[in-house]
Image: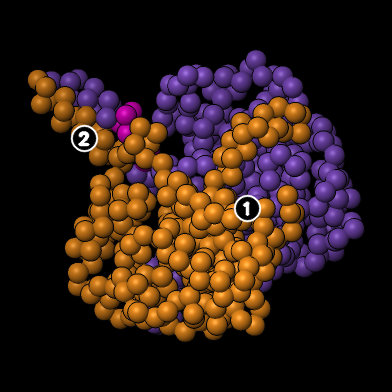
Chain colours: A orange, B purple
Amino acid sequence: MNSRLEVWAPDGLREIAPGDDLVALLAELLRDDPPVDGDILVLTSKVVSKAEGRVVSADDREQAITDETVRVVATREHASGVTRIVENRLGLVMAAAGVDASNTPEGTVLLLPLDPDASARRIRAGLSAAFGVRVGVVITDTAGRPWRQGVTDIAIGAAGLVVLDDLRGQVDSFGRPLVMTQAAVADEIASAGELVKGKAEGRPLAVVRGLGHLVTDEDGPGARVLVRLGDEDMFQQGSAEAYSQGWKDALRDQ
Amino acid sequence: MNSRLEVWAPDGLREIAPGDDLVALLAELLRDDPPVDGDILVLTSKVVSKAEGRVVSADDREQAITDETVRVVATREHASGVTRIVENRLGLVMAAAGVDASNTPEGTVLLLPLDPDASARRIRAGLSAAFGVRVGVVITDTAGRPWRQGVTDIAIGAAGLVVLDDLRGQVDSFGRPLVMTQAAVADEIASAGELVKGKAEGRPLAVVRGLGHLVTDEDGPGARVLVRLGDEDMFQQGSAEAYSQGWKDALRDQ
C-alpha cells in the first residue's frame, strides 16, 4: 500500500452553466499539471448539477425538497423554519434532501445530479481519454451526521476506484482477522479532497495522488454501494418520530 | 488557504506496551523526516490506549463495554451475538462503546484512552518541544455511521488545531453567506490520515502537511466539541427502541 498521498485543488475553473461541457472544462483546468495513472479526481457535485442544468427557482425550494424526497426520516422545527432529514432518490439521508442554495446563482437552488455514479463514469471516461491515463472519479456532497457536530464531505458518485475497501482476509499485526471489515475509502477520499477544495474558494476539483492501488480498470459499483438502508438501518426514523408512531399504534390497537 | 496537502505514514513504530514513553517513541519515529511548523500528526488511538495501559482481558469484554457505556442507543441481535450501539464516557456513539479487539495482544481487548484530548495535548507538547516546531495532534478511532456502509476514521482527541472550521461570515462565490457553517475538519483530517495508515500495516501515525492555517498556538477545545448530543440529537434512540418506548408509554397511560 502506498503510504504517501498528495492532494491539491487547481485554481481557475470558471462558473459552470447548464449545458457546459464539464469534461472539456476540467481537461482544460488540468492541462498544466495533467493527471497520471492512478490519480483520483474529487469533484464537488455542485458543478456537475450546474452542467446538467439541475437548477430550480428558489421559490420552488420546498417543493423541490418534497420532489427529491423518497421518505421522511425526521423533522425538527426551529426559528428559521423546519429542517427535514429525508432519504432522497439516491438513498442518501440528508437535510433538505441535498437541495442546496450556496454557490448557486441568486434566486436559484441546486438539486443533486440525477445519477451521480453515471456522471462520474462519464467524467472518468472523458478525462481518461483526454489524458490517456486511468483515473478514478469521486463526486462529493457535504452532509451532516448524527451525534457529530459539523459537516463532512462524502462520496455520492464514484467511478473507477474501490469505494468500500474490503479488508476481509487481511489480518492485524497479531495475525488475527480484522474486525472492521469494510473501510468507506471513497468517503475518506471525499473528506481529504474537501480539506484542499474548501467551501468558499471556488475550487471544486481536487486531485488525489498516491492511492493508485484503489483505482480500477472497471468503473465498478459506484457510490451507491455506500448506502445502507432497509433492515440494516437501525435509524430509519428520528427518535421522536418513532416514539410517537409507537404511541399511535399502541392506542390504535386498543 | 493552502491548496496542497501531503500525507504520509512513517514505518517502524514498534508494538506499544503499557508504560511506554509514547512521545519518545514517536519522536524517534519522526527523527529522519522531522515535522515542520504547521504539520498535523494523526495518531491511531490504539497506540495511545496501549501506552496508557487501557488493556483488559478479552473474557471481560462484555463487562468492559458495559463499564464504558453511559447510555444505550440501540441494540441489534445477530448470528454472532448482540451489537450494542451506545454513548460512551467520551460522548461518542459507537458500536461496543469503542472497545476493540483488533491489533491487540491475544486474549485482550483495548479500551479507548481515558481522556483522548488530554493525551493529544501531552503528545503535542512533547513533540513540539522535541522538534521545536508548532504541530497539531489528532487522535483517531474507527467508527460506523448510520445510513452509510463501511467505517471511517474520526477524531476522538485533538490539540493545537481548529477542530470545527467555522465558515460563518465567509461568503460563497456569489457573495452570499455560506449555509453549511461548520466543517468538521478534524474528522476529515482523521479520514485523510487513515488513507495512508491503513488498518493492517502497523503504521499508526500519519503526518499531514499543508494545513498550517488550521494549526493554532493554543491547544484549543479538543475533539470533545465534535460531540452533538442532547436536545440537538434527533437520533437519541434507535427507531425500534424509540417505537417500543412510545408503545409502552401509551399503554401505561391507559
Characterize the local packing of mark 1: few (<14), some (14-19) or many (20 or more) Cα atoms within 10 angstroms: many
For the point 57% across and 69% down, the residue is A128
Kind of element beneath mark 1: helix
Q: Quadrant of residue A63?
A: bottom left
**Residue B189 seen in the current view:** yes
- Picture disc at residue A244: 2
B114 or A52: nearer the viewer: A52
Q: Is residue A200 visible?
A: no
Q: Which residues are magenta?
A: B235-242
Tell which of B241 and A193 is nearer to you. A193
Residue B237 is a magenta residue: yes
**Identity of the residue drawn at 71% across and 39% down:** B200
Left/right placement of residue B204 relative to residue A124 reads right
Query: Residue A104: x and y, percent?
Result: 35, 76
Which quarter shows the C terminus of chain A?
Answer: top left
Counting labels gives 2
Where's residue B195, x and y in %?
A: 65, 52
Residue type highlighted by circle 1: Leu
Q: Position of residue A16 (x, y in %)?
A: 41, 80
